Amino acid sequence: MRILLIVSGGIAAYKSLELIRLLRGRDHSVTCVLTGNGGQFVTPLSLQALSESKVYTDLFSLTDESEMGHIQLSRSADLVVIAPASADILAKMAAGLADDLASTVLLATDKPVLAAPAMNVRMWLHAATQDNVARLAARGVRFVGPDEGAMACNEFGPGRLSEPPAILHAIETFFNASKPLSGRHVLITSGPTHEPIDPVRYIANRSSGRQGHAIAAAVAVLGARVTLVSGPVSVATPAGVTLRAVETAAQMLEACRAALPADVAIFAAAVADWRVTNAAGDKIKKVPGGPPPAFELVANPDILATIAATGPLRPRLVIGFAAETADLMENAQSKRIRKNADWIIANDVSPETGIMGGEENAVHLITPDGVEDWPRMAKDTVAQRLAARIVVALQ
Ligand code: C5P
């Protein structure tokens, strides 16, 4: 997990060093932002040595901004952690102030924020601080602590920074909740296949790979390890996904077999049903006035059905697509049984729907429990909904 750690001012700032050490020990990457007041208690050098990465301190630093602008910095993490979070930084955040690097990052970020407050007990209990904390919590900011105990200022009560192991625990609890597919392996096929006729010609179809790639992205965001076996497409490989690029159905099947075991397998590829048995080794010449070449076709292996029949290696959840232009539901229902899939996502790909190669999809999810008709929506949204259903199914 990538953590952006904001260290604000307070005597407890020294504990941020221990927190960085614990986070690094658990293989999380840590980038630090140190406020001016925080810099009175810990040095950029110690943060840098422990985090093993550059420490950012100044909103108007030319070198920092040219390396990584503050907007980019605010989005370059999975979680923003403020430890210690002073009364001042909580107030700035609540008010939406942006007058230094830390507060600007907090206003610009689109990432979740976890704050570990640390301050004098009177400051913590002050109505202003309590109002700010309530407002921030209502906006989705998470809190860990403060703990109760003796304070550096000789007072006693709530206001102590939570111990670094407790902050680490809060970070990892957040991580596990936001990554419900972590530890799961999801295999996805996507795109068309190209079946050669000769070295320069092939049989293909109009699949863009958009839906399969969107599903890969959606399950990767939820923490799954994803193997994406894709035919030739022009869509980008989603972040955090392992791509196995193939051309033919035979190669796609081999890549799928090699990727097992998997917890879930989703077959979104539009696999060519046939390949040319007598594909030519050299480019077929056009003979003026001569007969056109004859192609002999043979059926390709059914990748879904093969993987669904792999006995002990069969993924727990096998999901197929049924792209039809007629008798959609009947064909899809029988495909689920015939191919031994658990779920089938049925969609009408008649040209007038604009679905094949388009941005949107209108699908029906067929499970052993029945049929759900999903409204027409972006392929990304279909992917996110499907990913959420997979999380529930694996529980
Ligand atoms: O039989 P049909 O091609 O309509 O089946 C569609 C489903 O089966 C899709 O999930 C597709 O990815 C998968 N399939 C496959 N291998 C094939 C043909 C289809 O995995 N050779």
Image (cartoon, rainbow, N blue to C red):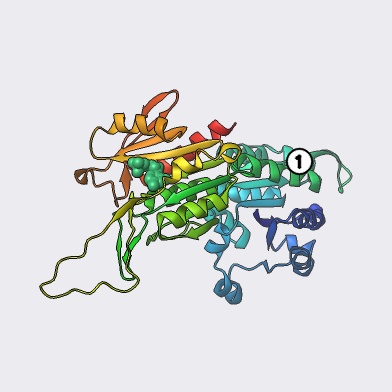
The picture places residue 89, in percent across and down from the top left corner, at: 65, 52
Q: Residue at x 60, y 76 (%)?
A: 63
Q: Which residue is drawn at 70% across and 67% down?
A: 53
Q: Name the residue nearer the viewer: 213 or 62.
A: 213
Q: Residue at x 72, y 45 (%)?
A: 117
Whether residue 11 sits left or right of residue 58 in the image: it is right
Q: In this view, does 361 lie above or below 255?
A: above
Q: Is residue 154 above or below residue 394?
A: below
Q: In which quarter of the image is the C terminus?
A: top right
Q: Name the residue nearer the viewer: 259 or 101.
A: 259
Q: Name the residue nearer the viewer: 72 or 357.
A: 357
Whether residue 376 sits left or right of residue 212 in the image: it is left
Q: Give, as a three-letter code, the residue at label 1.
A: Pro
Q: Which corner quadrant of the figure contains ligand 1?
A: top left
The picture places residue 100, in percent across and down from the top left corner, at: 61, 62
Quadrant assignment, res 68:
bottom right
Q: Is mark 1 on a helix, strand or loop?
A: loop
Residue at label 1?
A: 146
Whether residue 290 sits left or right of residue 342 in the image: it is left
Q: Residue at x 44, y 33 (%)?
A: 343
The picture places residue 103, in percent across and down from the top left corner, at: 60, 56
For label 1, being within 8 Å of ligand 1 is answered no
Residue at the farthest top position: 369
Q: In this view, does 248 lie above or below 346?
A: below
